[in-house]
Image (cartoon, rainbow, N blue to C red):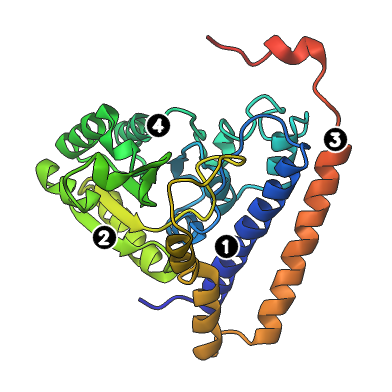
Amino acid sequence: MELSHEKMITMYRQMLRIRYFEDRVSKLFAEGVLPGFVHLYLGEEAVAVGVCSALNDDDYITSTHRGHGHIIAKGGKLDRAMAELYGKKTGYNKGKGGSMHMAHTELGILGANGIVGGGIPIATGAGLSAKMRGTKQVAVAFFGDGGSNQGTFHESINLASAFDLPVIYVCENNLYGVGTRQSKVRKVEHIADRAVGYAIPGVIVDGNDVLAVYRAANEAVERARRGEGPTLIECKTYRWHTHFEGEPDTYRTKEEVAEWKAKEPIGRFEVYLTTEKIATAQELESIRREVMDELEAAVKFAETSPEPELHEALEDVYA
């Protein structure tokens, strides 16, 4: 599959935007600047970017509690996302969603979700809606390995398979559900093997290789748009930080973390881009500076944005 120069550079920029955003969020949270809980996506950038690069603007995604990366990859702006984390009025959800509940329907982002596996049936419903309306839209459900043990996972995929719904189920298998290693709570080694029970394709991909993720996602998207139903994609990856910021890292060895950091996706893609002469080291450095400038502007935007008014607390409440 041939990818254009522009496409690959955009993918590189998107991964950097997620990496720098999350790095800064980690520091801001440690300084006590950000309210609430924060779950970071560091190390998993290739999954969100690889998948979302295969989508159209009007396609849908649902996310997890680790959702900043998905939102940025689907086209979210750093300033509005950062303002949301600050709890400011200019955030994507007027400061009411925070880290775990960010959504923006105009970008097809149907919400991050604090419930494990909670986005899976929502994406399935979006796929059903697209099919009933006769559009060529697809819906992607991002979820973790822990989410694949939820009943909603099995119910949703069964329904999507039975109705040939245009849904892509993307499992970000980072080895741990909170602090529990997956081998302690699941007998099958590969989550993609569960696709066999629902007569749909199950694909395993290196989740730290953005091009491999893109190719798998693009094939699944094309299949869904042809009306051939859902695909389950398992991306083998790793989160660098603990389940949530501030949590002691007592369940992983330093050697394991170091091993996975050595496989980190952005450095690998930089080597590919320069080796294949798609970009020079100077061009990549220029992109890094541009992203850093964008991030600094986003932090300033969030810091100087107004707080929501007290009377707004009960607005946008539907249930």
Question: Mark 1 and mark 2: span between their CA atoms?
Answer: 21 Å
**Residue drawn at (20%, 32%) of the image:** 159
- Tell which tag, 4 or 1, sits nearer the viewer: 4
* Disc 2 residue crowd, few under 14, some 14–19, many 20+, Cα 10 Å: some
Amino acid type at circle 2 is: Ile
Kind of element beneath mark 3: loop
Amino acid type at circle 1 is: Met
Kind of element beneath mark 1: helix
**Residue drawn at (78%, 49%) of the image:** 298
Name the residue tied to disc 2: 204
Amino acid type at circle 4 is: Val
Mark 4 and mark 1 lie on one chain; the one further toward the N terminus is 1
Q: Position of residue 185 (x, y in %)?
A: 25, 39
Number of the label disc, if any, that sits on residue 116: 4
Q: Are marks 2 and 3 in contact (CB under 8 Å)?
A: no
Question: Mark 3 and mark 1: span between their CA atoms?
Answer: 26 Å
- Tell which tag, 4 or 3, sits nearer the viewer: 4
* Disc 4 residue crowd, few under 14, some 14–19, many 20+, Cα 10 Å: some
